[in-house]
Image (cartoon, coloured by chain):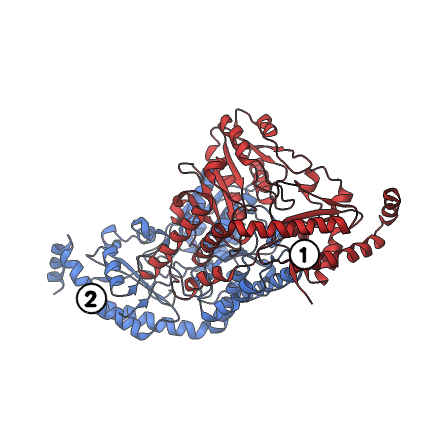
Chain colours: A blue, B red
Amino acid sequence: MKKAYLDNIATTLVLPEVLEAMLPYFRDVYGNPASLHDWGDGAREAIEEARGQVAALIGSRPEEIIFTGSGTEANNFAIKGLAQAQQSRGKHIVISGIEHFSVLHSAKTLEKRGFEVTRIPVDRHGLVHPDAVAKSLREDTILVSIMHANSEVGTIEPIAEIAKVVKRAGALFHTDAVATGGTIPIDVKELEVDALSLAANQFYGPKGVGALWLRKGTRIIPLLDGGVQEEGRRAGTENVPAIVGMGKAAELARQGMSPRTAHLSRLRDRLIQGLIATIDHTILTGHPGQRLPGNASFCIEFIEGEAMLMLLASEGIAASSGSACTSRALKTSHVLTAMGIPPEIAQGSLLFSLGVDNTEEDVDYVLEALPPIVDRLRQMSPLYGKFLKSQRGVR
Amino acid sequence: MKKAYLDNIATTLVLPEVLEAMLPYFRDVYGNPASLHDWGDGAREAIEEARGQVAALIGSRPEEIIFTGSGTEANNFAIKGLAQAQQSRGKHIVISGIEHFSVLHSAKTLEKRGFEVTRIPVDRHGLVHPDAVAKSLREDTILVSIMHANSEVGTIEPIAEIAKVVKRAGALFHTDAVATGGTIPIDVKELEVDALSLAANQFYGPKGVGALWLRKGTRIIPLLDGGVQEEGRRAGTENVPAIVGMGKAAELARQGMSPRTAHLSRLRDRLIQGLIATIDHTILTGHPGQRLPGNASFCIEFIEGEAMLMLLASEGIAASSGSACTSRALKTSHVLTAMGIPPEIAQGSLLFSLGVDNTEEDVDYVLEALPPIVDRLRQMSPLYGKFLKSQRGVR
């Protein structure tokens, strides 16, 4: 059976060059970077090279990169660590309603510790408007966190514009760039944020490693207490092979960004146009233009999404209905809800997230496999009557 | 030049079988375990197999294992998460004075949040006495954390006896088993603790993965908020290859524990006897009998330890002066201080931690290389006069 992996939002594959770069740090240079001997020296040098590679990807200084164990950890660290470091100045935090759960739930944890959180609405394309941010800011606002792009619907947020608003108010600004880091160009100097989260497994690096970029001089309270690793900001023996892999993946992403973007956008547009042409009552979700190159997200009306995923999986096609972090919770996406999409439409959510190894054949295979699945499910759906009625209306 | 790695306390090598087991999860089964398709299914099954392997190592149920990103994270999670979950019952915590920094500093963080921490003294062998624990317990004591063994001096603590005392008082009991997990037999039912931390890179598994064993039904507040991974207790995409590696390492440790222990103890005793016989004014630190099989820790008087490490490194020998997590801080070990060893002796701390691939030749190489280094350093030392005087006293 043909197989096509179009679930790169959940995690990308690890490029062979990345794995090659990691292997010596399992096999030979297995020391602890903190150790004062050859085994440690080699590991330490490798980490510092990786730090430089990740810094180069986002235009930062190497010493501003703090390696973490995941994008989720980077987000928890940023939200909780910055809020706690600033709490003598105020206890108000602003986030958007479409953040990843690692930001949403970190904010919720802070609420339990006496912080106040404002959640900004988004428009029907998932855009956070700088005006809405401006309106939310108060004297005691210490931290704003708005994601760089939403990976479920692909919308890229106007971070640089929002940053100007936040800066004027004197609050810190964090952006979750897990969906964009290594995928679209990022320059922290242009974005003018204070902190930015990355995850290697979103740009063909390994799982188990992420990074928080933190502007030099910004105070943060550690999430992981212990040894003096990462300048005392993140304790625990460094995951050397994974960090090396993240560095290599960052280097490859920086060098290959422009051809990768062209490839992904071409496939994305072919998939979007093809699906909308062949399956009626298909709505593209997210911003039509300002979107991630690999993101083709839809709501297919009169369908229950999970069943669609199962049938696609039985045809060898990997897709998702949104964030993998909640796929087993079977809830309507909070992102689609925040965009004003009614539950009966949101339940037909279907997300294809393309990766560098996808081909036109993969896209054509989806375009061939999906319509009969949709037909079959619509016939079985309790909404079938409604669907037929809508059809008569159309014709 | 001959090379000998005797710094297994800092991190062990990754066994070839462990790396072999990990590789498919980089190359082929690279999906997110949360995803609803083949790529995810394979990853999820692999994690559950590893969970079973780690559970078997410590005699627990699989569902009681929560994978983390390191031993440090497991300790932070246990201390902070259990304390926060219990805080309506009281705010008093008990730890020993020789805990790893991930426990010590987590407790310090809790102090800043209004908890009270009692630090129990140890005897000159580094033993925590159950009586001392009993004396420290109060009505409002909610959590006790005593390490299973101290990896710096090798002393194994009487955890099962301490557990009885703690249980009687109705507090939760956590033990940091990073130094013992996979090295000496552990059965959580016999230890009668409520939570236990492990790190794979202490038993020939990869860096970047640890585990917290948590007794079924014990409430804990997550350290990492976000997705619903690990039954909602630890968010973030699972580090599948590393978890698989930890599982494999656990299986190998369980199967090979008895020959490994025999091998390590033999080398350890050869090293201890050899060093004490050839270098005068050498003190074995830690408990003479109740100690980790691979631990040979000393204080060599009239020496500054860091210089000794450098010269050993220049002979190709990896050793340490204590915890790698603080080796760059160049402070006197808090463990030796807590054991009552005066600073001028503690500064000559030297720790050889043996691993499964060490040989008699490695030990003999150390026994040959170290005496001239010690001679040379003693002659350069400001304490040389005192040393000569002590020599005259001896002879």
**Relative side of A262 to B291, left or right:** left
Quarter occupied by residue B125:
top right
Residue A73 screen position, x and y as percent: 48, 51
**Marks 2 and 1, Cα distance to the nearest angstrom?**
69 Å
- Badge 2, how many Cα within 10 Å: few under 14, some, many 20+? some
- Residue A82 seen by the camera: no
Residue type (three-letter) at the residue carrying disc 2: Pro
**Relative side of B92 to A13, left or right:** right
The disc label shown at residue A259, or none: none
Quarter occupied by residue B240:
bottom left
Residue A304 screen position, x and y as percent: 22, 55
- Badge 1, how many Cα within 10 Å: few under 14, some, many 20+? many
Q: Residue at left 75%, top 55%? A: B308
**Of the two numbered discs 2 and 1 in the rendering, the one whose residue sits closer to the viewer:** 1
Q: Chain of mark 1?
A: B
The disc label shown at residue B363, or none: 1
- Residue B135 seen by the camera: yes
Q: Secondary structure at mark 1?
A: helix
Quarter of the C terminus of chain A within the rendering: bottom left
Quarter of the N terminus of chain A within the rendering: bottom left
Residue B12 screen position, x and y as percent: 57, 56
For label 2, the residue is A371
Residue type (three-letter) at the residue carrying disc 1: Val
Residue ranking furthest to the top: B139
Residue A261 screen position, x and y as percent: 41, 71
Residue A143 against residue A303 in the figure, above or below: above
Q: Secondary structure at mark 2?
A: helix
Residue nearer the viewer, A184 or B110 = B110
Residue nearer the viewer, B190 or A361 = B190
Q: Mark 2 and 1 residues: CB-CB less than 8 Å, in contact?
A: no
Q: Residue at left 36%, top 53%? A: A122
| Whether marks 2 and 1 lie on the same chain | no
